[in-house]
Amino acid sequence: MVITKKNDSIAVSMKLENTGDYKGDEVVQLYVKDVKSSGQRPLKQLLAFERISLKIGESKIIRFQVPVQQLMFWDEKCREWHFEKGDFEFMIGASLSDIRLKKTFKIKK
């Protein structure tokens, strides 16, 4: 998994390959976790997903563009949207219970 920040978005990419004996479909799901949130946040938040069809032996690069605004949360105390710097763990898998790749990315204000 590769994570890069460009302007106001974060690019997450990975290579998906069909190593099986049949053509198949996979729903690639991207989750994020705010490692040390000062507010109440979900443990894992679904950011994006894409259904991919692959022939036998075929591979594709999967790319997600995540606007940094998707990492903001509503601060009830201040009554405004809040963005905090720190470590965010990005996870890719076939489901929430089937995470196959993880990488931590530090966001600086």
Image (tube, grey):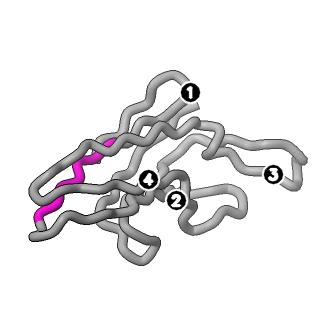
Amino acid marked by disc 2: Lys
Q: Earlier in the sequence, mark 4 or mark 1?
A: 1
Q: On residue 50, which mark appears?
A: 4
Disc 3 crowd, CA 10 A, few/some/many (<14, 14-19, 20+): some
Q: Residue at x 78, y 42 (%)?
A: 81
Callout 3–callout 2 Cβ contact below 8 Å:
no
Residue 18 spot, x, y in % from top left: 17, 60
Left or right position of 29 against 38: left
Disc 4 crowd, CA 10 A, few/some/many (<14, 14-19, 20+): few
Q: On residue 101, which mark appears?
A: none
Q: CA distance from mark 3 to mark 2?
A: 17 Å
Secondary structure found at label 2: strand
Q: Residue at x 61, y 46 (%)?
A: 71
Q: Earlier in the sequence, mark 2 or mark 1?
A: 1
Q: Earlier in the sequence, mark 2 or mark 4?
A: 2
Q: Which residue is mark 2?
A: 33
